[in-house]
Image: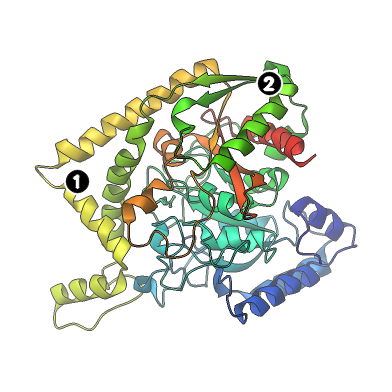
Amino acid sequence: MLRDLTISKIVEGIKKGQLSSYEIVKECIEEIKKDNSSSKPINAFITLMEDYALEQAKYIDEQRNKLEGKLLGVPIAIKDNINVKSFPTTCASKILEGFISVEDATVVERIKNNFGVIIGKTNMDEFAMGSSNETSYYGIVRNPHDRDRVPGGSSGGSAASVAANQVVCALGSDTGGSIRQPAAFCGVVGVKPTYGLVSRYGLVAFGSSLDQIGPITKNVEDAAILMDVISGYDPKDSTSVQVEKISFHERLKEPVDSNSITVGIPEEYFTDDVQEEILEAIRNVLGLIEKRGVKVRKISLPRTKYAIPTYYIVAPAEASSNLARFDGVRYGYRAKSQDLLDLYFNTKTEGFGKEVKRRIMLGNYVLSAGYYDAYYLKALKVRTLLKNDFTNAFREVDFIITPTTPTTAFKIGEKTSNPIEMYLSDIFTVTVNLVGTCAISLPVGSDKNNLPIGMQIIGKPFGDAELLRFARFVESLVSS
Ligand code: GLN
């Protein structure tokens, strides 16, 4: 099997002529097709780009001596809310049925410039709203570790496809946890970069002040390589930040001075509500790093309990504005209608799913005159207080360690009837988006049902390279 190789191994093998991109890509595609015809398919892909990918791979094999790229010949999957020119972008919604992207997202352009081979667009929760991949118009995604359980969401297809070795690496997007939570549920690595580090140009906006694209990979090294490819200033995204361009991958190679690192453990994240096996796995990791000289100390992030309510005001508010453009005139699906008002009404009624409608209504409500001050403005103020919590904590510690999720992967259908319970599965991840900083989810063990356990490490804003380096150090201790 070649598809279980990591990025660096594949690139090295292809450069030396020992590996063929065509063979690897073919293996991935065959595996996906085989799985699609099984009785409980993972269903990680909405669009499979078979002909395109095989042609690209063939070209790369033929031209390998002339080509230079960090992803030379590596199969990669892209979440279906990120545009890939000439292919559909569905956001897993009926409302985008028939829509074909007219250009590449900046991250996709950068992947192509580095000769990554895009093999398909991955399934997700509709418009990235959800934590279980059950809101997709294109069907649920199953967790490869247990096909009766969810893969997490909203980047469920990206995480599941990497975990099942259907692809080598993938891109997801994270508005409140959508990279880290599915990564934790599927036992892979997921990175939410600092806001502004990765261009959002060509990503269909959900919560514009929260969204970031990031890597989902098998290990930290691959995540660093992908970060090198996708990060960096982009004049097409006004929120893209001009920071000194560093190589995340090179930085990984520098040794970690563990004696000079202090890690904070926020008491608000380690409660009785967290599955005991998750707490145990994290305690075990803390023991390992302490043995290497890392100082571990208790901290407090006192406003943690306000994170979910704040997120569920800010994110729907932004979504209600962003999703107004899907009106049956400009993109995708158009419902039958008598006049213009009817067209808007019918298209949105038929095109959007239940969760998306719920968010649009919630968003319009909190932004409406009379409620704006009470909800939206208040949420923005609390967001600042949450930010202050982190600024204070980072004066004393270098990283913050928390569980990624309160439980391991739950059963399909278990939370669909109770949206609040579904929202609470992001309780440990949403704050990072509200604050705008970076975090990673690392697999650190499994529970008694053999379901993966994820641990979150939160880094300082724009400390993404240090975060990855420390995560790599932790990963080496966990896997040895
Ligand atoms: N699960 C969260 C939500 O439903 C986060 C989603 C995301 O990060 N895109 O909004």
Q: Is residue 278 visible?
A: yes
Residue appearing at x 75%, y 35% in the figure? 477
From the Cβ of disc 2, is ligand 1 less than 8 Å away?
no
Quadrant in the rendering for residue 440: top right
Upstream in sequence: badge 2 or badge 1:
2
Count the numbered circles shown: 2
**Residue nearer the viewer, 392 or 474:** 474
The residue that label 1 is drawn on is 366
Q: Judge whether 94 appears above or below 283 on screen.
A: below
- Write the residue at 55% across / 23% down: 264
Q: Is residue 29 above or below residue 406?
A: below
Estimate the x, y position of residue 165 in percent, counting from the top left.
70, 63
Residue in view at x 21 percent, y 57 percent: 361
Across and down, in percent, residue 224 comes to: 67, 43
Does 209 sit left or right of 86 as displayed? left
Q: Secondary structure at mark 2?
A: loop
- Viewed as shown, does residue 281 lie left or right of 182? right
Specify whether 388 is left or right of 406: left
Q: Which mark is residue 448?
A: none
| Crowd around label 1: few <14 · some 14–19 · many ≥20 (10 Å) | many
Residue type, mark 1 in image = Val
Residue 445 horizontal/vertical position (percent):
67, 45
Q: Which one is nearer the viewer's eye here, 98 or 379? A: 379
Read off the residue under disc 2. Answer: 294
Is 129 placed above or below 190 here?
below
Question: Do we see residue 232 in this rendering?
Answer: no
Where in the figure is residue 377, as x and y percent of width and height? Answer: 21, 35
Q: Secondary structure at mark 1?
A: helix
- Horizontally, residue 319 falls left or right of residue 92, namely left
Question: Label 2 crowding class (10 Å Cα cut-off): few <14, some 14-19, many 20+?
Answer: some
Amino acid carrying label 2: it is Val
